[in-house]
Image (cartoon, coloured by chain):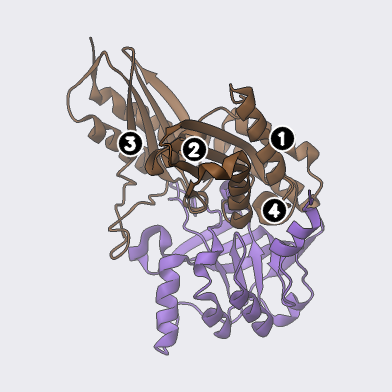
Amino acid sequence: MSDEIKLQTPLTTEMLEGLNVGDKVLLSGTIYTARDAAHKRLVELLEAGKELPFDPVGAVIYYVGPAPARPGKPIGSAGPTTSYRMDPYAPALMDAGLKGMIGKGPRGQAVIDSMVKNKAVYFAAVGGAAVVTAQAVKEAKIIAYEDLGAEAIRELKVVDFPVFVANDTKGNDIYQIGVEKYKIDD
Amino acid sequence: MKEINVSRVIPVVKKLCIDSNYYASPDVVEKIEYFLEKEESPTARDILNLILENHKKAAEEQMPMCQDTGVAVVFVELGQDVHLIGGDFNEAINEGVRQGYQEGYLRKSMVDDPVIERKNTKDNTPALIYTEIVPGNSLKITVAPKGGGAENMSEVKMMKAADGIEGVKDFVVDRIKRSGGNPCPPVVVGVGIGGSFEQSALLAKKALLRPLNEKNPDPKWAAVEDEILERINKLGIGPQGLGGRTTALAVQILYKPCHIASMPVAVNVNCHAHRHLSAVID
């Protein structure tokens, strides 16, 4: 479980099918930030049949609202936010080609079913380890919704961004499997 | 009577906001190291090590350990022999928060008109200020930045006296079980019992302020805290909910008297960052 798997974006079904829950992944390439308010706008665009601010095919969305960057740094502290709030929007984005989501905390069954259908993966980043994750971000630029501040959509270039596979393409859920494994019944 | 000019409050609050976000509290680090020793899950150990590495890097890089630098919860203990002069005390606290969040590169996470507009106030004000009048002639200020993920897993339950202590234990354990990985475990669990609907919630938040290396002074309640903690750490949720033994670092309880018909119980969940820092102005 401690062996690290390196993945480069954009992600493909072939790259993801071999992943299992609990796998430690170092992700490199381009990822996009979006959280509550940005997701609402993205799904409104999809419903209106309009183009998204980035190509969703093979893309990875990171659920994060970073802290402000110090001068000379690409980004401030940038750990994951809780993912369930994005559950109402995630299946529509996966239907549009989204292959990866990064956040923290368990997902609903509709999201898990959509991951199986679309061969997509949900990665858990370590909540609160926001300096370590920020250091994996080499470049950041706002590409949409600047008015949302911390919630704007940013394009991030990341190198060896540390995550764990929380839901794989086979419908497995680490939030159930991991807990079952370590649960002690009285 | 001692006079304290409120302008002295501004730099103190500013520094507390910044330092509580940059520097992990030693009692928190100590607890994480203690549980790391006992943790059986390799993934959980990876995560706990990453959290400890993050604490070091946050201090080195002068960055907040978490991007969610929270709502600025401010507890004030105001000595009754203090006369505050020179302006509006609450505004001075808000100015300290404003300066701390701006100059410390902390995230501004407050939205006004919280349902319809949800418009960011852009300076993380207003702070949530709780002032208590106490004997003495000094002013103690505690800043406890509170993240949204853990706060969202909190709950007040108006229980019945017949539910008893076992009912209280079951409610707290069940609240953490239902929270799963959402509140950024390993969590610290604040429990407030008694008072009224709103006072139990405030007690739960205040219970979080006790240092993690201090036991409840009442052995009877210390035993309850230990038992709840043990039951929580048998749930298997583990760090970040990915499975493991370390779901909570501590359970801390405060209580007050309440009405004969009532037994309110509140659970306030804090993430592993568990930020709070105090200063005294005299």
Question: Which of the chains bears the disc numbered 1?
Answer: B
Circles 2, 3 touching at the beta carbon (< 8 Å) = no
Residue B260 on image: x %, y %: 43, 37
**Residue at image point 60% right, 39% down:** B165
- Disc 4 versus disc 1: nearer the observer: 4
Q: Locate the C terminus of chain B by quadrant.
A: top left
Q: Residues within 10 Å of mark 1 (few under 14, many from 20)?
A: some
Residue assigned mark 1:
B33
Q: Considering only order in the chain, which callout, 3 or 4, is on the residue closer to the N terminus?
A: 3
Residue assigned mark 2:
B192
Q: Considering only order in the chain, which callout, 3 or 2, is on the residue closer to the N terminus?
A: 3
Q: Residue furthest bottom?
A: A49
**Residue at image point 37% right, 34% down:** B74
Given residues B76 and B192, the one toward you in this image is B192
Q: Which chain is assigned purple?
A: A
Residue assigned mark 3:
B129
How much space separates mark 4 and mark 1, taking CA atoms?
18 Å
Q: Is residue B55 visible?
A: yes
Q: Amino acid at mark 2?
A: Gly
Label drawn at residue B237: 4
Q: Considering only order in the chain, which callout, 2 or 4, is on the residue closer to the N terminus?
A: 2
Numbered-mark total:
4
**Residue at image point 73% right, 55% down:** B243
Residue A169 on image: x %, y %: 72, 77
Vertical relation: B274 (above or below) A80: above
> Disc 3 on helix, strand or loop?
strand
Given residues B51 and A178, the one toward you in this image is A178
> Disc 1 on helix, strand or loop?
helix
Q: Is residue B57 visible?
A: no
Q: Amino acid at mark 4?
A: Ile
Q: Residues within 10 Å of mark 2 (few under 14, many from 20)?
A: many
Vertical relation: B185 (above or below) A154: above
